[in-house]
Image (spheres, helix red, strand yellow):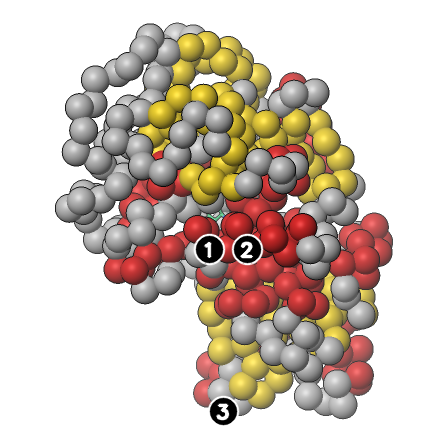
C-alpha cells in the first residue's frame, strides 16, 4: 500500500462514529470543477451533493487556493481516481453536521487540512498527523466509509481531491479534515494554511529544522516555496537563497525574506559557495512545480556537511530513479528527507499560523497574487503555469 495504511477502521475512531447513519435530508445541487480524465481541463458543472453522513459535515466554501497538486492530478503526475472534483486548500462555513460529529457546529468557520487527522492512530498520537492512517485513506478521494457524496448529473460518482473537493460551492467532508478557526480571519487568506503555507513553512521549521544562523536554499518559488522562505526567515536563517527562473517570483521571494536570488541551480551554486565561504547551504527545501530526481545530486552538492535536503515537491509517481552519490551522503553525513504537509500537525499548526498572520509575522496577504471565480479555474492554472502567480485563490462569493 503506497500510503502505508495500517487499517481502515480504528476502534472508537472519530472518523467512523458509531451512530445511526440514516441520511438526514435529500441532498442538494451545487456547482463544481471536475476533471473527467487525465489531461482534461477542469469542467464547471452542476452536481448532486448528498447530505453529510455520520462523522461528516456539509460546508459552504468561501475560498479555495489553487495549489499545483490539483494540476498534478489533472496531468496524471499524481494519479488519482477520475472523475474528480479538484481543490484541497479550502476554507468555508459549516451548513449542516451529520450524526456523531463532535466539536463542530453549523456556522463554524473551518479550514480543511489536506491530510485528515483522526487524532488516535499511532502517527497522530506521536505528533505526526500528516501521516495519519485515516488521512492516508482519504487521500484516495473516497469518503471514509468507501462511498461517495458527490455525483455528476448523470448519476456517476465523483471522487474529491484529498477527500475535500474545494473547487465546489458546497462540499461534504469528514470531520477529521476540519479545523475550526476564529470567525474574524478572512477566509480567502486563511484557506492557504490548508496546504501551501503550512507545507512550505513547516518544511523549513519542522522538516528542515532551520535554526538561527542557518543558510537555507529554497528551490522553486510558488506558494509552497514562498512559504518556505517565510518559515526560514521566522526560524532565524541568516541567508535565504531563492531559486526560480521567473523574475517576478525572484522579486517576490525577496519580499518574503530571501536575501539572495538566482535564476537556476547553476547560477546559485557558485553564489552560495562564495558567500558561505565554501560551507554551502545548511538546509535545502525542494519546492519546484514538478520535482525532478535527476537534480538531487546537484542540490546535495550545494548542501553543507551534515546538511539536510527536504523533498517537499511532488515528483511524478512514475519517476523511480534519482541521481545521488551515496558515498558523499555517507562521508559528509548529509541527509535527504521527504516531508508531507510540512511535517506539521493540522490541529495545532493551522490555528498557530493564523495567529502568526494576525501578529503580522506571517504574510498571507501578499501570497495571494490574483483571485478568480470558480468559472475561471482553468485561467487561474494557466496563470500559475506561466509563472504569473505566487498563489491564485478562487473566491466563491465574487
Ligand atoms: C500534495 C501531496 C500529495 C497529495 C496531494 C497533496 N501536497 C500538497 O499539495
Ligand atoms: Zn497543495
Ligand atoms: Zn490519525
- Residue 156 pos. (x, y %): 36, 15
Tell me if residue 23 comes above or below residue 184 in the rendering: above
Q: Which residue position is annotated with label 1?
A: 348
Tell me if residue 179 comes above or below residue 24 in the rendering: below
Tell me if residue 258 comes above or below residue 386 in the rendering: below
| Mark-to-mark CA distance, 3 and 2 | 38 Å
- Residue 13 pos. (x, y %): 22, 44
| Mark-to-mark CA distance, 1 and 2 | 6 Å
Question: Could you say whether the residue bearing mark 2 is in a helix, strand or loop?
Answer: helix
Query: What residue is drawn where x is 55% and y is 55%?
Result: 352
- Residue 42 pos. (x, y %): 57, 24
Q: Between label 3 and label 2, give the one nearer the viewer.
A: 2
Q: Quadrant of residue 161?
A: top left
Q: Is residue 37 visible?
A: no
Tell me if residue 136 comes above or below residue 294 in the rendering: above
Q: Which residue position is annotated with label 2?
A: 352
Q: Is residue 179 visible?
A: yes
Q: Are marks 1 and 2 in contact (CB under 8 Å)?
A: yes
Q: Nearer the viewer, residue 387 or 253?
A: 253
Q: Which residue position is annotated with label 3?
A: 331
Residue 164 numbered tag: none
Query: What residue is drawn where x is 65% and y is 29%?
Result: 394
- Residue 173 pos. (x, y %): 39, 31
Amino acid at each position: 500500500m503506497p500510503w502505508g495504511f495500517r487499517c481502515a477502521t480504528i476502534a472508537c475512531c472519530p472518523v467512523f462514529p458509531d451512530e445511526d447513519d440514516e441520511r438526514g435530508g435529500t441532498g442538494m445541487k451545487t456547482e463544481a470543477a471536475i476533471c473527467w480524465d487525465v489531461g482534461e481541463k477542469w469542467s464547471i458543472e452542476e452536481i448532486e451533493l448528498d447530505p453529510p453522513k455520520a462523522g461528516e459535515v456539509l460546508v459552504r466554501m468561501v475560498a479555495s487556493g489553487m495549489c499545483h497538486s490539483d494540476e498534478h492530478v489533472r496531468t496524471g503526475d499524481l494519479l488519482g481516481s477520475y472523475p474528480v472534483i479538484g481543490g484541497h486548500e479550502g476554507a468555508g462555513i459549516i451548513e449542516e453536521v451529520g450524526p456523531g460529529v463532535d466539536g463542530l457546529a453549523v456556522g463554524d468557520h473551518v479550514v480543511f487540512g489536506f491530510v485528515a487527522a483522526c487524532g488516535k492512530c499511532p502517527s497522530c498520537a506521536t505528533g505526526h498527523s500528516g501521516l495519519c492512517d485515516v488521512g492516508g485513506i482519504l487521500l484516495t478521494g473516497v469518503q471514509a466509509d468507501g462511498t461517495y457524496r458527490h455525483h455528476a448529473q448523470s448519476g456517476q460518482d465523483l471522487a474529491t481531491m484529498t477527500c475535500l473537493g474545494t473547487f465546489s460551492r458546497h462540499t461534504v467532508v469528514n470531520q477529521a479534515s476540519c479545523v475550526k478557526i476564529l470567525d474574524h480571519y478572512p477566509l480567502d487568506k486563511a484557506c492557504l494554511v490548508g496546504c501551501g503555507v503550512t507545507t512550505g513553512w513547516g518544511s523549513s521549521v519542522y522538516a528542515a529544522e532551520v535554526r538561527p544562523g542557518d543558510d537555507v536554499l529554497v528551490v522553486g518559488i510558488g506558494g509552497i516555496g514562498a512559504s518556505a522562505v517565510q518559515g526560514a526567515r521566522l526560524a532565524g536563517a541568516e541567508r535565504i537563497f531563492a531559486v526560480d527562473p521567473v523574475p517576478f517570483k525572484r522579486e517576490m521571494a525577496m519580499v518574503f525574506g530571501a536575501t539572495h536570488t538566482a535564476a537556476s541551480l547553476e547560477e546559485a551554486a557558485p553564489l552560495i559557495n562564495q558567500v558561505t565561504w565554501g560551507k554551502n547551504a545548511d538546509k535545502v527545501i525542494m519546492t519546484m512545480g514538478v520535482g525532478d530526481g535527476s537534480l538531487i545530486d546537484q542540490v546535495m552538492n550545494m548542501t553543507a556537511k551534515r546538511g539536510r535536503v527536504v523533498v517537499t515537491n511532488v515528483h511524478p509517481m512514475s519517476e523511480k530513479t534519482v541521481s545521488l552519490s551515496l558515498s558523499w551522503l555517507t562521508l559528509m553525513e548529509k541527509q535527504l528527507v521527504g516531508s508531507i504537509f510540512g511535517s506539521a500537525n493540522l490541529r495545532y499548526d493551522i490555528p498557530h499560523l493564523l495567529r502568526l498572520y494576525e501578529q503580522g509575522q506571517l504574510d498571507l496577504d501578499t501570497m495571494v497574487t490574483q483571485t478568480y471565480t470558480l468559472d475561471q479555474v482553468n485561467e487561474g492554472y494557466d496563470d500559475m503555469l506561466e509563472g504569473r502567480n505566487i498563489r491564485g485563490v478562487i473566491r466563491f462569493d465574487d
